[in-house]
Amino acid sequence: MKRIAVVGAGFAGAVLARELAESGEFRVDVYDQRSHVAGNCHTERDDKTGVMLHTYGPHIFNTSREDVWDYVRKWGTFEPFVNRVKAHTARGVFSLPINLLTINQFFGKSFNPREAKQFVANLGDASIHEPSNLEEQALKFLGQDLYQNFFRGYTLKQWGVDPTKLPASILQRLPIRFNYDDNYFNSRFQGIPTDGYTSIIKNILKHPAIDVWLERPFTSSDKIAYDWVFYSGPLDSWFNFHLGRLQYRSLVFERFDETGDYQGNAVVNYCDEAVPFTRISEHKHFAPWESHESTVCFREFSKLAEPDDIPYYPLRLADDKELLGKYVELADKERGVTFIGRLATYRYLDMHVVIAESLDLAKLLLENVGDSSAWPTFSVRPQ
Ligand code: UDP
């Protein structure tokens, strides 16, 4: 049997480890430097209150791929959950994503969908043809008022740079709706695991051909013991930051406990630049099927990741992309390693995308079991 190391026990690594182990062709060692599996999706029950905490921030599972939805539900049950985010702005609290209720309440109107569409189209900046950055994307489709109140402040806090320096694609994640649908996601399937994400990932990793090694960092020099390594840590870290550091945003969570219901919703975004945090999450509302007297909330602050901080969001500014290109060239010269997941491919990825990519990659690997020259350097090539 071939010996495989998987570095990182988040979704990218766990799904791949399982698929390889099940083929009967491989023995898989999964390494993680943390004391738990599940990466940034990790959930744990709070000792004090019994509330299930999303330790590294809110995770709401959503996908339109039926195979991915079927896959995750093999490892535990999911409860129905629809993410309905609220926006706290300088002009009051509104519904997100921007929808007919938001437009009517924000502008004091009673539009129907057709009227609202026309109204917002007139607000948009028609002189922008191909939006080349986040600000232009917002101005083209929404105009100054909505951009200033909902996006500019939040984006400045979240990314720490002017929205003209960010790609338009960041905003394309958010739908704009001309009906009263306030579901934050467009996906066909959505839910939260009954027993948390860590339980799902533990179940994925429970296989006789898989060993999990926690609190065990793995570096390029450890690869000698293996036929192949699948690495889901930061790409620049694999190369000991030889060419410099790719930039990430990191998050800081400030916990506070209350009794009863603090904010009446799981997530409230604070869009005003004057408020220093980006959002408050009240974690018991991620599990409405449970009931708890106490409540645990987190104010979420965003900052540039320093070397000792946990990397969350790839920043992907022009300099980062140039450096990324150089690391990709280095990676292409490596033998016996495939880079997988959000950190190693330096992309802003949701859980369901990572799972889909690992399932797709496993299929390709297993179709080429005897021919590792067909095994790719990246699950999906970073750009
Ligand atoms: N965004 C914003 N205001 C909001 C919500 C989102 O300006 O109230 C922008 C912001 O730039 C953010 C992006 O839209 O980074 C994507 O938001 P999403 O909620 O998908 O971010 P995530 O939940 O992944 O942090």
Image (cartoon, rainbow, N blue to C red):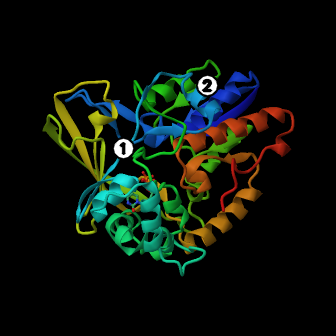
* Cβ at disc 1 under 8 Å from ligand 1: no
Q: Name the residue type under label 2.
A: Ile
Relative depth, front residue between 246 and 239: 246
Q: In this view, does 299 lie above or below 168?
A: above
Q: Is residue 202 left or right of residue 108?
A: right
What is the distance, in whole Å, between disc 2 and disc 1 at their CAs? 38 Å
The image shows residue 262 at horizontal and vertical percentages of 17, 42
Q: Where is residue 266 in the image (x, y as percent from the top left)?
A: 30, 41
Left/right placement of residue 377 relative to residue 297 reads right
Work out whether residue 308 can be spotted. no
Residue 339: which numbered mark, if any? none
* Residue drawn where x is 63% and y is 48% of the image: 221
Q: In which quarter of the image is the N terminus?
A: top right
Horizontal side, residue 32 vs residue 261: left or right: right
Q: Residue at x 53, y 73 (%)?
A: 133
Q: Which of marks 2 and 1 is in front?
A: 1
**Residue 13 position by quadrant:** top right
Q: Looking at the rendered structure, which numbered label has been put on residue 210?
A: 2
Whether tag 2 and tag 1 are in contact, CB under 8 A, the answer is no
Q: Quadrant of the C terminus?
A: bottom right
Where ligand 1 lies, by quadrant?
bottom left
SS category of the residue bearing label 2? strand
In the rendered image, the residue lying farthest to the top is 208
Within 10 Å of disc 2 (Cα), the crowding (few <14, some 14-19, many 20+) is many
Q: What element carries label 1?
A: loop
Q: What residue type is labelled 1?
A: Arg
Q: Position of residue 199 (x, y in %)?
A: 45, 25
Quarter occupied by residue 334: bottom right
Task: Where is residue 78? Give x, y as percent.
Answer: 46, 26
Disc 1: which residue: 84
Q: Which residue is outermost to the left? A: 259
Q: Which of 351 and 339 is in front in this view?
A: 351
